[in-house]
Amino acid sequence: MKERTFWHGFLVVVLLNASIYIGCSGGLNVFSKADDIALGQQVKAEIAKHPQEYPISRDESLRSYVQGIANRILTSPVIENKDFRYEVTIINDDQTVNAFTLPGGPIYVYTGLIKFVDNEATLAGVIGHEITHADHRHSTEQMTKAYGVSTLTSIVLGNNAGTLAQVAASIAGNLAMLRFSRNDERDADATSFHALNSIPGRPWYPAAIRYFMEKSLAKTGKTSNLERLFLTHPPSEERLAAIDKLAREAGLPAPTESALNSTGYVRYKATGR
Ligand SMILES: [Zn+2]
């Protein structure tokens, strides 16, 4: 019940302003870009009210370090919605290896993820993946698919409270886990690669997200820390192979230490309060 209330509040706000929108990726989306931003900010405010579920880290140096990675990725011409609010929040939970993004930009990174990855380039690859989910508006596209244009627009036009409650309850089950389609995952991986590959000065090996996938796959079934990751962005051999293919096609040489930055990253693996 608690979750239902949690998601119900923001849905009302967003649906009042919903309009039909065909996303740039071709998916139908009844939400406007402004709705995505409003929705993300509303959910962000709700998250801040639930410190038990989302213990926000007060380590500002860690937060600004990860924000700096996101900001650098945003300098890539591949990222389309530059006006989205890609604000990083760190969740102080070492037991969860995951990250998630809200519509319109807010990015949440668990300390468990920061400790799990072995170098900065890999973290950048994951952040690029998360930025893409917001930039390509996957969440609101999935909501449109799940509930249908007619349902969402009838709620907007008719203010059908009963249907709204139903939709809100279902969204609590779906969006609360921010589950994406396999196509969304493929798109986020490839776009992360292209974004990192096109950052001026190319600070990181663009295919480093492969190390995250490789390690997650190796640890499958051996730790419960990966459960949420497998619910929301399930790693697979197919995703790993696709990233390696992109690296081959781009003719990337094997990464140097400076393109991975594992030595500089060590101190961040030790933080997280
Ligand atoms: Zn994903």
Image: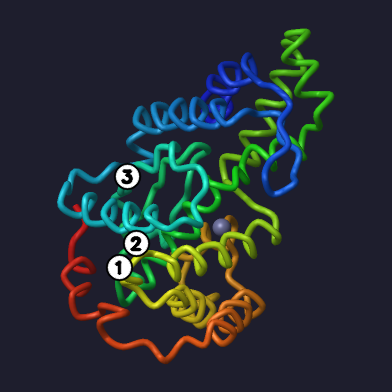
Answer with left or right where residue 237 lies relative to residue 263: right
Please give the residue where the numbered disc 2 appears in the rendered image. Answer: 112
Q: Position of residue 132 (x, y in %)?
A: 53, 53
Residue displayed at 30% across by 75% down: 119
Q: Residues within 10 Å of mark 2 (few under 14, many from 20)?
A: many
Which residue is more in the foreground, 112 or 2?
112
C-beta proximity under 8 Å, tags 3 and 2: no
Residue type at numbered disc 3: Thr
Answer with left or right where residue 37 lies relative to residue 186: left
Q: Position of residue 114 (x, y in %)?
A: 31, 64
Figure quarter occupied by ligand 1: bottom right
Q: Which mark is residue 11?
A: none
> Quick one: label 3 or label 1, which is nearer the N terminus?
3
Residue type at numbered disc 2: Gly
Snapshot quadrant of residue 13 = top right
> Quick one: label 3 or label 2, which is nearer the N terminus?
3
The reply to whether the residue tagged 1 has its Cβ within 8 angstroms of ligand 1 is: no
Instruction: Estimate the spatial distance between the alpha carbons at disc 3 and disc 1, rounded to whole Å.
Output: 16 Å
The reply to whether the residue tagged 3 has its Cβ within 8 angstroms of ligand 1 is: no
Q: Which mark is residue 115?
A: 1
Which residue is more in the foreground, 111 or 187?
187
Residue type at numbered disc 1: Lys
Please give the residue where the numbered disc 3 appears in the rendered image. Answer: 89
Q: Which residue reaches farthest right?
A: 150
- Secondary structure at badge 3 equals strand
C-beta proximity under 8 Å, tags 3 and 1: no
Residue displayed at 76% across by 10% down: 157
C-beta proximity under 8 Å, tags 1 and 2: yes
Q: Nearer the viewer, mark 3 or mark 1?
A: 3
Residue displayed at 52% across by 57% down: 228
Which residue is more in the foreground, 10 or 23?
23
